[in-house]
């Protein structure tokens, strides 16, 4: 985990995730060994969307990052390991800081970094007007949408922003986005025991999405000290939920691999912890140094 300083005096967290894609088959034979790294970047300090299971949402909204501050997370991470993929799934709602995110992605895919647009994913809780703009402004990137509930009533309980962006309007926006982008959309769905993980919920979600080109990504809930009252769905329930959506509704459905719980860096856990961060060397309690803002580094140079 990286904790990066900002010009405002605040800081944000970013997470490097390393994946070994050598498992499975490629072109009929074993995959060549390939360790690749994905960087999860933040676009805001805190978040105003208030998702009830998310530690970042419990912080409230503290401020937007500039495009440069978003790109700096990639600069710092690239000093540790080559970065192949970027996901805007860190702190904040990227589409509430739209101009800076657009500029940052264009920099990441430009001459300096040369990342492929289809290796960049922008995740949103469903800011409908900006979804409609995204396909034009960032062609080729991938869109992820945090749905988390198959009905408007339940979604309002889990994702308060659903009151402003109703589920029906969100689905219409996804249709429009897909008509322009021709891209498959990633649907993110956090699994909360006894709340949105029933067989009825699975059928509701399947019916909602069955006519769309989507991949449903089921996310095991990551406990956090900032939020109480939620429990992770059992593995049995997650597998049953996946089976129903796959076999009854024909939707490609994956289960997100759990990573980063030990450093409070998993999905929904980012909240500017001051201790027990950044343990790449196997230590268990070494706090992460706050990485200097690049403008400050330049000012110190002779």
Image: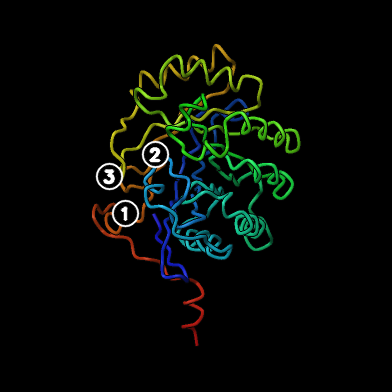
Residue tagged 2 = 52
Question: What secondary structure is found at the residue carrying circle 2?
Answer: loop
For image coordinates 46% across by 38% down, the residue present is 160
Residue 185 lies, in percent from the top left, at 62, 33
Q: Residues within 10 Å of mark 1 (few under 14, many from 20)?
A: some
Q: Residue furthest bottom?
A: 302
Of the numbered discs 1 and 3, the one sitting upstream in the chain is: 3
Hey, which quadrant is residue 277 in on the image? bottom left
Q: Which residue does the image show at 54% across and 60% down from the upper left?
A: 70
The spot of residue 90 in percent (x, y) is 47, 49
Distance from the alpha carbon under mark 2 to that under mark 3: 13 Å
Q: Across the whole image, how many numbered discs are drawn on residues?
A: 3
Q: Secondary structure at mark 3?
A: loop
Reply above or below: 294 against 91.
Answer: below
Q: Position of residue 29 (x, y in %)?
A: 57, 27
Please tell me which residue is depicted at 39% across the width and 60% down the height of the picture. 3
Q: Is residue 288 above or below residue 240?
A: below
Question: Who comes first in sequence, dot 2 or dot 1?
Answer: 2
Q: Whole-Å distance between the Cαs marked 2 and 1?
A: 28 Å
Q: Which numbered circle lies on residue 279?
A: 1
The colour scheme used to paint the residues is: rainbow
- Which residue is the extreme one toward the left? 285
Q: Residue 180 falls in which quadrant of the image?
A: top right
Mark 3 Cα shell of 10 Å, populated few (<14), some (14-19), many (≥20): few
Residues marked 2 and 1 touching at CB (< 8 Å)? no
The picture places residue 186, in percent across and down from the top left corner, at 58, 34
The residue where tag 3 is placed is 225
- Which disc number belongs to residue 90? none
Q: Earlier in the sequence, mark 2 or mark 3?
A: 2
Q: Are marks 1 and 3 in contact (CB under 8 Å)?
A: no
Q: Calculate the distance from the C-alpha at mark 1 to the C-alpha at mark 3.
A: 19 Å
In front of the other: 237 or 172: 172
């Amino acid at each position: 985990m990286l904790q990066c300083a900002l010009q405002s005096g605040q800081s944000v967290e970013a997470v490097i995730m390393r994946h070994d894609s050598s498992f499975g088959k490629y072109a009929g034979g074993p995959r060549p060994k390939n360790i690749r790294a994905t960087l999860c970047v933040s676009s805001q300090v805190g978040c105003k969307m208030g998702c009830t299971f998310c530690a970042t949402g419990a912080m409230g909204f503290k401020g937007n990052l500039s495009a440069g501050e978003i790109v700096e997370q990639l600069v710092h991470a690239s000093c540790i390991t080559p970065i192949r993929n970027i996901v805007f799934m860190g702190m904040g709602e990227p589409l509430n800081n739209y101009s800076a995110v657009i500029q940052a992605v264009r920099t990441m895919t430009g001459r300096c970094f040369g990342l492929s647009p289809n290796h960049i994913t922008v995740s949103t809780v469903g800011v409908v007007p900006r979804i409609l703009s995204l396909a034009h402004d960032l062609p080729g990137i991938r869109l992820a949408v945090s749905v988390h509930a198959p009905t408007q009533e339940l979604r309002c309980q889990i994702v308060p922003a659903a009151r402003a962006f109703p589920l029906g309007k969100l689905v219409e926006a996804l249709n429009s986005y897909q008509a322009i982008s021709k891209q498959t959309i990633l649907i993110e769905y956090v699994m909360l025991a006894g709340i949105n993980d029933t067989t009825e919920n699975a059928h509701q979600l399947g019916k909602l999405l069955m006519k769309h080109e989507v991949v449903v990504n089921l996310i095991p809930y990551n406990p956090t000290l900032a939020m109480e009252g939620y429990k992770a769905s059992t593995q049995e329930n997650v597998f049953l939920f996946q089976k129903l959506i796959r076999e009854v509704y024909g939707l490609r459905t994956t289960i997100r691999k759990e990573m980063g719980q030990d450093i409070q860096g998993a999905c929904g856990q980012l909240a500017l912890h001051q201790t027990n961060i950044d343990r790449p060397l196997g230590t268990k309690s070494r706090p992460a140094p706050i990485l200097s803002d690049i403008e400050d580094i330049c000012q110190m140079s002779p």
